[in-house]
Image (tube, rainbow, N blue to C red):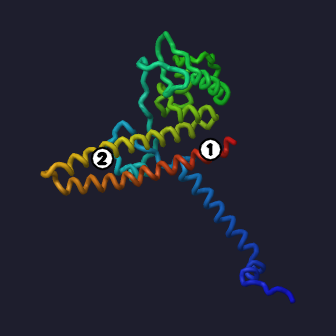
């Protein structure tokens, strides 16, 4: 005796085209959401990190929606007070000799030549030529100091915009974490003070609660973006 077809099988046979179209629409929608909200595409630029305070940190979500330009992190030509040593980060620009040799600086110079069309001498010294090459390709970043995460992005040959976007994401997250730590200390001081204003304490707790949500969202975005990049690199 032939097995009786389920209601789903009957529906599928009658509406095969509709099922396929619906599945395609759902798939494309999911891919677009991943592309839009995981750091792969910057829709909302972030405010300059040099103006961090309680008000700007808590209004970051609202203000980023209206921002139209990517913030430019401050550049500096000052001589670095720290040495470049192989195996250590950040890599620091040095404006005058003697220049320190760093294997990571040499690797960075080779990556700039290979992936971004530069013609640097890969001598492992972070001088003016290397700084100008970095500024040309990543004008929105503070290229006088290269963090390990930015270094890894360049070493993988990521697009210029992706290097900028993800570096700004991490810098933004670092700023939020610093603000949260500052306000934790402030809250502890207020709670120990018997004459402290109760409304001020509640307001600070609300601010910290909202900021904690922003921190978790940034961590997830950066983590997923990094995973997708690793898969793409493989």
Side (left or right) of 89 relative to 47 = right
Q: Is residue 4 left or right of residue 25?
A: right
Residues packed near mark 1 inside 10 Å, few (<14), some (14 to 19) or many (20 plus) = some
For disc 2, the marked residue is 184
**Residue occupying image coordinates x 69% and y 42%:** 234
Query: Observer-nearest residue: 96 or 194?
Result: 194
Q: CA distance from mark 2 to mark 1?
A: 34 Å
* Vertical comparison of 26 with 126: above or below: below
Pick out the residue farthest to the right: 1
Q: How many marks?
A: 2
In the picture as drawn, the residue positioned furthest to the bottom comes out as 1
Q: Is residue 181 above or below residue 157?
A: below
| First reached walking from the N terminus: tag 2 or tag 1 | 2
Front position among marks 2 and 1: 2
Q: Where is residue 85 shown, x and y percent of the image?
A: 52, 20
Residue 182 location in percent, x, y?
30, 42
Kindly check if marks 2 and 1 are in contact, taking CB atoms under 8 A apart as contact: no
**Most distant residue in the left direction:** 195
Label 2 crowding class (10 Å Cα cut-off): few <14, some 14-19, many 20+?
some
Does dot 1 land on a helix, a strand or a loop?
helix
Secondary structure at badge 2 equals helix
Q: Is residue 227 left or right of residue 187?
A: right
Residue 12 falls left or right of residue 158 = right
Residue lying at the far front of the rendered structure: 192
Residue marked by disc 1: 229
Report the quarter where the N terminus lies.
bottom right
Residue 103, image x, y percentages: 59, 21
- Which residue appears at 52% of the width and 41% of the height? 166
Numbered badge on residue 158: none
* Whole-percent x, y for residue 223 in the image: 54, 47
Quarter where residue 125 is shown: top right
Write the residue at 67% across / 27% down: 114
């Amino acid at each position: 005796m032939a097995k009786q077809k389920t209601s789903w099988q009957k529906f599928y046979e009658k509406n095969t085209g509709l099922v396929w179209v619906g599945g395609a629409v759902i798939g494309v929608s999911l891919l677009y959401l991943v592309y839009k909200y995981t750091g792969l595409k910057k829709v909302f630029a972030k405010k300059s990190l040099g103006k961090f305070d309680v008000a700007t940190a808590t209004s970051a979500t609202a203000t980023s929606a209206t921002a139209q330009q990517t913030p430019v992190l401050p550049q500096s030509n000052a001589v670095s007070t720290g040495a470049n040593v192989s195996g250590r980060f950040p890599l620091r620009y040095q404006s005058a000799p003697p220049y320190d040799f760093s294997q990571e600086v040499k690797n960075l110079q080779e990556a700039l030549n290979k992936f971004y069309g530069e013609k640097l001498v890969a001598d492992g010294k972070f001088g003016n030529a290397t700084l100008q090459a970095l500024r040309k390709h990543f004008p929105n970043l503070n290229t006088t100091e290269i963090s390990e995460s930015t270094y890894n992005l360049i070493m993988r040959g990521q697009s210029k915009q992706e290097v900028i976007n993800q570096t700004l994401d991490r810098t933004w997250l670092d700023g939020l974490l610093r603000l949260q730590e500052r306000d934790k200390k402030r809250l502890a001081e207020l709670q120990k003070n018997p004459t402290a204003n109760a409304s001020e304490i509640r307001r600070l707790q609300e601010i910290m609660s909202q900021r904690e949500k922003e921190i978790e969202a940034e961590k997830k975005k950066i983590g997923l973006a990094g995973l997708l990049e690793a898969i793409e690199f493989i």
